[in-house]
Image (spheres, rainbow, N blue to C red):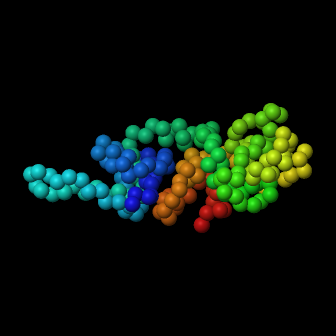
Amino acid sequence: MFEHRILRTDVSGMPLEWVGYEEAVRYYYLEQVAYACGSTLYQIRGGYNSVTGQRSVLTLNSIIATEGARQALLKGRIGYVPPLSNPTLFRRDANVCLYCGKRFRNAELSRDHVTPVSRGGFDTWNNVVTACKRCNNHKGDRSPEQAGMQLIAVPFTPTHAEYVYLQGRRILADQMEFLKSHFPRRSPLRVRLP
């Protein structure tokens, strides 16, 4: 019933995170919601007022802006690097092995270090790509050039707005438009999205 998550932003509209309906209700209860936009997702019905007999109803939209989000200042700064995880890495690369170009399920993929860690490479967004297990095993502890393999795309570090998109599951059209408006103009993700 509550399958869609709500996009939470700060008051300036900077995307922060996805929240469930329970957490959105908490923001309303704490009077931290500055405004809401997007489509109506849910109508949450509460208890009855003992004096008026009226039932409380809270309408939850697909996007809410909350006050007091100091974390947005950090996430919007130049040099901010979102945490790296395999699910977001695989989503960044559209579940495509960046060596053979085939699409795979998450269970069939692995994180490959373009410059192997054993050769001074780092576990950072700009040095990791999605690779099928076969290609990763073939490449082994070598650079792509040494292994005779070629990358089909250049790895990149997502901005925070791109990272929020990468974490989303069932993103609604209005949420996607909102997020896309925060992507850099030359974002590789813009090419893939409608």
Determine whether, in the image, residue 155 is placed left or right of residue 166: right
Q: Residue at x 40, y 63 (%)?
A: 39
User: Which quarter of the rendered picture does the C terminus lie within?
Assistant: bottom right
Q: Measured from the top left, where is residue 126 in percent x and y?
A: 72, 43
Viewer can see residue 82? yes
Q: Measured from the top left, where is residue 94 in percent x and y?
A: 66, 57
Determine whether, in the image, residue 159 is placed left or right of residue 101: left
Q: Measured from the top left, where is residue 35 in percent x and y?
A: 36, 52
Q: Residue at x 54, y 41 (%)?
A: 75
Residues 147 and 72: in front is 147
Please tell me in which quadrant of the rendered image residue 63 appears.
bottom left
In this rendering, the answer to whether 175 lies above or below 78 is: below
Q: Residue at x 20, y 52 (%)?
A: 47
User: Which quarter of the rendered picture does the N terminus lie within?
Assistant: bottom left
In this rendering, the answer to whether 113 lies above or below 132 is: above
Q: Residue at x 76, y 42 (%)?
A: 113
Residues 51 and 39: in front is 51
Residue found farthest to the left? 51
Q: How many marks?
A: 0
Viewer can see residue 182? no
Determine whether, in the image, residue 36 is placed left or right of residue 157: left
Q: Measured from the top left, where is residue 153 in percent x and y?
A: 76, 54
Determine whether, in the image, residue 64 is placed left or right of residue 115: left
Residues 68 and 61: in front is 61
